[in-house]
Amino acid sequence: MRKNPPLWGVRGAYMKRFIGFIKKEFYHIFRDRRSLFILFGMPIAQILLFGFAITNEINNVDVAILDHSKDANTQEIINKISASKYFSINQLIINEKDIETVFKKGKVKAVLSFEKDFSKKLIKDHEATVQIITDATDPNTANTISNYVNNILQNYTQGLNNKATIAYQITPQTRMDYNPELKSVFMFVPGVMTIILMLVSAMMTSISITREKELGTMEILLVSPLKPLHVIIGKVIPYIFLSVINATVIIVLSIFIFKMPVQGSLILLGLESVLFIITALALGILISTISATQQTAMMISLMGLMLPVILLSGFIFPISSMPMILQVISNIIPAKWFIIIIKGIMLKGVGLEYVWKETLILFGMTVFFIALSMKKYKIRLE
Amino acid sequence: MSISITNVSKSYKDVKALQNITFDVKPGELFGLIGPDGAGKTTLFRILTTLLLADEGIATVAGFDVLKDYKTIRNSVGYMPGKFSLYQDLTVEENLNFFATIFGTTIEENYDLIKDIYIQIEPFKNRRAGKLSGGMKQKLALSCALIHKPKVLFLDEPTTGVDPVSRKEFWDMLKRLQKHGITILVSTPYMDEAALCDRIALIQNGKILEIDTPEEIVKHYPKTIFNVSANNMYQLIKSLKVYEHLYSIYPFGEFVHYSDKREKFNSDDLKHYLETQNLSDIQINQTQPTIEDTFMELAK
Amino acid sequence: MNNKNVIEVENLTKTFGDFTAVNAISFEVRKGEIFGFLGANGAGKTTAMKMLIGISNPTSGKANVAGFDVFTDADNIKRNIGYMSQKFALYDDLTVKENITFFGGIYGLSRARIKEKANALISELGLQEVTNQLVGSLPLGWKQKLAFSVSLIHDPKIVFLDEPTGGVDPITRRQFWEMIYKASYQGTTVFVTTHYMDEAEYCDRVSIMVNGKIEALDTPKKLKEQFNVATMNDVFLKLARSPSPTLPKGKGVNTDKDYNHEKKSSPLGS
């Protein structure tokens, strides 16, 4: 029969149990491949991603030059800009109207505009101005760009001053287009909308389907006249509905509360949103075909979708500043294309003619996911 | 309509779930598949309802091949998988409506079939299925499986984990369903329920031990069984286990089922032996073998 | 308190809001007894058992388990009892040896003692070949037997078994019950709930709960005589069917003499 432990050993006994318990927990962790992956794989992946992807640093940003002067000084400045690793001269534009065009196209993030008779003004008045016009839909980048350009100008002025008796001054005038107050909300709203749509559509759909599998009701559905296609579509329709409502609410809120403008067509915005919702749903279905449990579905949705979306879609951190390989990877993330589209429509007021490429890519992705899901959808339990 | 299974085998990695299963179920029969967990019952059911593919062998349900004609089978059989999968957050009525709808019928159309069953849960028709007791869930799941008037009904362990009263009621319902001409294949680990079937197949570790009517199966027990009891069960078992003429011994409630190696068995010998083991109140009476005795004998 | 009783329950009650799950039950369990605690799902069985093993506080009434009060001394109860349930008994992703070591540690056994127990257990159950195999890979029957042995590893006075033999084949079930007999013979009290009515026959005494009350408590033999039926299954059917006559307070025996004594042959009887 059991003897009572001696009093002095009581604390020892507690410790023993406690340690025994900890030991067991370690066994659990090391034997479960999934938790191992999350414990070790995720942090490593995150550190790498964060290390490389997160940077407010800019690199090879495309600039366009509007040179009304075309003289020696402007050429020197342009050369300096071109030589800088931060910038890359994309094109030379002719007049003011082109600025908007080139911003709408999306590649060029800043325009340097030199006033007429730049050199003459410098020599005569020792003063001239340069306009730094940035696409401020990404306010962080816009700021950085204007700062760096400023630095280059300062440098140049310094150089001039070294050889002169009276100081030269080149005054930069910054203009932040599309977001004059550098409201970060303008950047966040498209990003948040994307994430919420992705969340509701992809994650919820995949969870809903795998829940049927987990509960066993999927078995009965299979042994019934219901075609697999009907099951999937039936699951998906409520989420389309919910997502559309979500998207509408977000847009309405941002217009009325954040005073965010919707420059472009609301109809186009709506249609593109629906397209993205369907893309996300298709992804959700695909995830459910490879998950046996709700937990798996949720993990895959979070790790495989959320995180890359946040980090790589360009929503927080500019893609152009990431290492090449991440830029390439970011191309397969549907969210990236959608953010470009809605930023364009909402902030720059572009029409389909500017975003048809991105729309086509989204469409192609959707078709691909749906085809893959249908192929993988099991009509049997194995 | 009948079920026909020929040489069906199925393995998962290196576990042989089913080995060379062959038997038939006649139209309108109430056929029991009797065996414990892991015997292969659920695997066999899933093959017959076309949810799994057999590695070898053929099976037909109502004349349709489970491989080629799976769509037809899925449209016409009733299936109640283990742990009666119901939608926990739908009410009783909503569940029933759902299953009726996906089979293209309505509750009213085949109401006469499920009436006796549904009447018992009708007072709760607006309660969520998740909040029902085990016995109620069982009845609801059965109603949902019957709502489209299937010709063949597959019930995978419908009485597991349910209290004895509900179990008894369930089997009463099955007997009444048989009168409608529905073929019913039921699996259960409860040996006492086996006695209620027309024919049964005893299954263990993926193999069929025996197939026959309940009355005939007990005749397969090779020896005579005696109920033995004494004043102390533990000592009784211990003593009998070292008895030289022991053939088999199994506890059975307040008695022990004992069978002897010898053809001619004299119960007085045994009584003397047990008395030398310091046991008293010894009783030894011949008794009939049950299906459970037969199962254990065949499974040895 | 009577020294021979390891469990004493007096008017134990548990309510959830206005729903009474356990309604003033009273009974005793003697040392070394195999006590069957039966009842349909929802009858209050599980709730009552939770109070006895110290993981749920009673609303009113008293109960002593292994000499400790369930209300004030729950921690001591947990240390002095063993527990095994159908849903969970051992960790599937630990080996046989690791499970034994872990549970031994939880109950405060010394390293030497654990080793001793482990060796005894493994050889008794014939698990030498699979000592270092994950429990999850063992057949259900072996798992259950191992779980039972592990629940006894600290030599508790009472072991609570919650539907321990669900789904197991008939041979293993009997082997399991032989282990129970042995434990009882050696002085451990066994408190077991089960859905297998034939297992109720193995118990020394059986109590049947219906709607929160104990409607019957006696030896299987006497209960069968009282209800004039052949099996415990039939006893159960009778009890759950008939309108429940309330018991005189404080006792667990049905003394209503107006019971319908017709002998019903049930298809579920043997």
Image: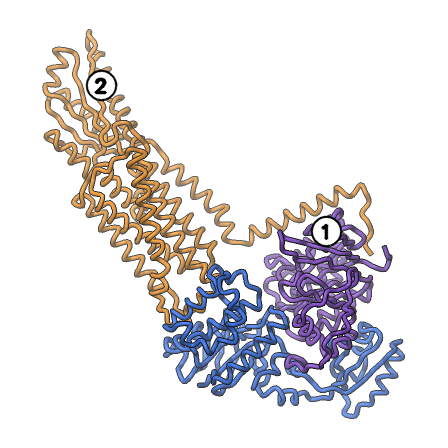
* Rendered image: mark on residue C60: 1
> Hue of chain B?
blue
Q: Disc 2: which chain?
A: A
Q: Mark 2 vs mark 1: same chain?
A: no
| Residue type beneath disc 2 | Tyr
- Depth check: C240 or B294 in front? C240
The chain displayed orange equals: A
- Depth check: A226 or A72 in front? A226
Q: Are marks 2 and 1 in contact (CB under 8 Å)?
A: no
* Rendered image: mark on residue A105: none
Q: Secondary structure at mark 2?
A: helix
Above or below — where is A351 with respect to B188? Answer: above
Which image quadrant: the C terminus of chain C?
Answer: bottom right
Could you tell me residue A252's position as x and y percent? 30, 40
> Hue of chain C?
purple
- Depth check: C226 or B265 in front? C226
* Rendered image: mark on residue A156: 2
